[in-house]
Image (spheres, rainbow, N blue to C red):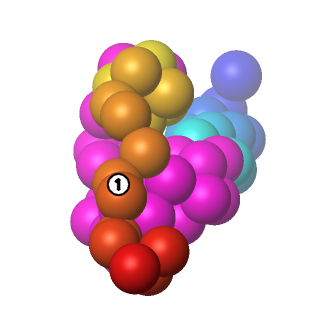
């Protein structure tokens, strides 16, 4: 595998995990940008973490 292919695949990997983490985080009432960055930096570990954290109760049902 040449260097260009490696970095292209790495970039796609970072975007995919960042996107998944951001989406799941936003559905749970968490920071979209924070989970996107976590997904980019930590990949699969951040995905497991965002799935494991509980949904935030915003208190909108008062």
Q: Nearer the viewer, residue 48 or 30?
A: 30
Quadrant in which the N terminus is drawn: top right
Per the picture, the main secondary structure of the magenta-coloured stretch is helix
Query: Crowding near pointer 1: few (<14 within 10 Å), some, many (20+)?
Result: few
Residue drawn at x 35%, y 54% is 56
Location of mark 1 (residue): 56
The percent position of residue 57, horizontal first and vertical second, equals 36, 58
Above or below for 5 versus 19 = above
Q: Which residues are magenta?
A: 20-45
- Left or right of 15? Residue 21 is left
Whether residue 32 appears in this view of the structure is: no
Q: Nearer the viewer, residue 59 or 35?
A: 59
Q: Residue 35 appears in which quarter of the rendering?
A: bottom left
- Left or right of 29? Residue 9 is right
- Left or right of 52? Residue 23 is right
Residue drawn at x 34%, y 31% is 53
Q: Secondary structure at mark 1?
A: loop
Residue drawn at x 50%, y 53% is 28
Q: Residue 59 appears in which quarter of the rendering?
A: bottom left
Whether 13 is among the magenta residues is no
The percent position of residue 51, horizontal first and vertical second, equals 50, 27
Q: Nearer the viewer, residue 26 or 46?
A: 26
Quadrant in which the C terminus is drawn: bottom left
Above or below for 27 versus 9 = below
């Amino acid at each position: 595998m040449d260097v260009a292919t490696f970095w292209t695949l790495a970039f796609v990997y970072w975007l995919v995990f960042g996107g998944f983490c951001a989406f799941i985080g936003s559905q749970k009432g968490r920071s979209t940008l924070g989970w996107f960055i976590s997904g980019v930096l930590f990949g699969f570990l951040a995905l497991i973490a965002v799935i494991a954290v509980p949904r935030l109760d915003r208190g909108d049902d008062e």
